[in-house]
Image (cartoon, rainbow, N blue to C red):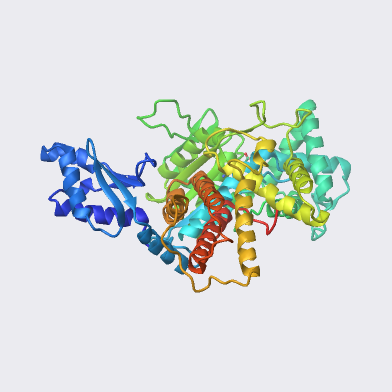
Amino acid sequence: MKKILDLITDEMVAAFEKAGYDKKYARVTLSNRPDLCEYQCNGAMAAAKEYKKAPIMIANEVTGQLLGNPMFETAEAVNPGFLNLKLSTEFLAGYLGEMEADEERLGCEKTKHPRTIMIDYGGPNVAKPLHVGHLRSAIIGESIKRIGKFVGHHMIGDVHLGDWGLQMGLIITELKLRKPKLVYFDENYEGEYPLEPPFTISELEEIYPTASAKSKEDESYKESAMQATFELQNGRKGYQALLKHILEVSVSDLKKNYENLNVSFELWKGESDAQPYIPDMVQKMKDEGYAYISEGALVVDVKEETDTKEIPPCMILKSDGASLYNTTDLATIVWRMKDYHPDEIIYVVDKRQELYFTQVFRCARKTHLVEEDTKLTFLGFGTMNGKDGKPFKTREGGVMRLETLLSSIHEEMYQKIADNRTVEEEQARETAKVVALSAVKYGDLSNQASKDYIFDIERFTSFEGNTGPYILYTIVRIKSILSKYREAGLDAKDAKILQAHSESEKALMLEIAKFNSVMENAFEETAPHKVCAYIYDLANALNHFYHETKIMAESDGKIQASYIRLLQLTKHVLEICIDVLGFQAPDRM
Ligand code: ARG
């Protein structure tokens, strides 16, 4: 279905041409003065220069061509030459009728050029608990993936586990100290390694911080951990088997955590999966003359003439031959290209890694790991701060674990729900979980990703204002009217949306009609916050309409049924939108 803006532009193009002006002036936009009009065209002002005529004259000639056009309630030329447009509610009702008929997509067409897009998000580090920094990547990445899917692209999410660094060596070292008799440490062992991991997730989560603390105080402990990391990376069998166990235990725990966040990945690959691709990649970079030794390390220059700030070379191998974060990221691009041939790879990572990704992308391009038209996109997100404006911490000043944060929000939400209503405890708990997720996700996504934001539990969990719970509350309100209507034995199945009967109803219709263009735009700009801003406006329009209209008391059955259809459509739009944001609405609140 065409976007409403395009339909209006089509009419405007015809009007400009009939009046004898070039169609390039016929561009229509949403009004920036909603008090005066709904859509506007400023083309007469620009055309005035070319045609050497007063803009208002041109505008008048164009509106002359729009007289009697059923799309418009009014099309006015206003000094000095604005074209102010108001849509007829008949046209709007027809447009919404078409949206309704397209039950699954509500008039948002699938793209004609589907692309394969890999999205690298989540980025948890194995054996380290998830902390709030990982929350943003998960929430934003998941939403971008869902928006892309909805628009019709082939989206592949990859969690890209951090499973190849020093943390692995630390765990191995500590484990060796505790259980030196395990076969994994016997270099002469030839048999099969046990299937059962030698630790549980809670042990693992305790082992890592212990080891990490020890390594900070004890130089020789750190040496051992580095040695273990080196041996692991060079294929020591017992350590590889341990890595497999660490991964298994860690991944099943991570999956649970992500599931609670309604986040899921197509691929559970990690840095370690890039390992087999490193030797050939490095060799090629050397053979083709891109990589050279500088101060012992192997590097590729990535600075460009137009740089205004210093972009250091991309380091490929350390002087001891060890691979780095860069190396795994580059080799990951190699297998991604080989196995999936993506048109684009989007990285949803903390914006403090921007320079790093500039180096990686330039290096990948220069050494031809990707094709010329493969897009590499860095979507850097800002920091989630506490109310004091500083990075979110526990009361004691430690790193806040994601689980701790989420459970405090559940609790806050549960209190609110339990205070207000008389529902069973169990149901209140369930509802609290669903609503809490909306609070966290909407609180995050409603900000432009690149900006820092303040995580304010009180504000995010409020049922009023620009919050997730407010959106859910609006959906629940609609559900409740719809069920009252049904309980009264009524049915709007054969009804249709009629012309608006009030300003507030028309305002609601205008908001609904923007749905397809919002979705497309949110995808093009990788901007879930645009979906949030839209549903906030839509929810406001709905609530305004609800307060001004006696829906259940309406005596004209046709009008009442038309209201009901409008509510259903609003609910449907809201539901699709919150689904792409990654949360759902309960039946009651
Ligand atoms: N594990 C990393 C971290 O915690 C994030 C990974 C981001 N993705 C990537 N391809 N480097 O900082």
165 relative position to 445: left or right: right
370 relative position to 388: left or right: left
Question: Who is closer to the viewer here, 394 or 465?
Answer: 465
Q: Where residue 372 appears, x then y in whole percent? A: 37, 49
Q: Quadrant of residue 398?
A: top right
Q: Please tell me in which quarter of the rendered image ligand 1 is found.
A: top right
544 relative position to 268: left or right: left
Q: Residue at x 31, y 48 (%)?
A: 85
Is residue 138 visible from the viewing direction of this image?
Answer: no
Q: Residue at x 62, y 72 (%)?
A: 489
Q: Where residue 325 appears, x then y in whole percent? A: 59, 40
Q: Quadrant of residue 96?
A: bottom left
Q: Residue at x 53, y 73 (%)?
A: 493
Question: Who is closer to the viewer here, 303 or 200?
Answer: 200
- Is 272 rendered above or below residue 153? above
Is residue 420 visible from the viewing direction of this image?
Answer: yes
Q: Where residue 290 appears, x then y in whole percent? A: 43, 39
Going by the picture, which residue comes out furthest to the front?
555
Q: Residue at x 66, y 41 (%)?
A: 462
Q: Where residue 447 appears, x then y in whole percent? A: 55, 39
- Is 23 rendered above or below residue 388? below
Q: Quadrant where the N terminus lies?
A: bottom left
Question: Who is closer to the viewer here, 391 or 466?
Answer: 466
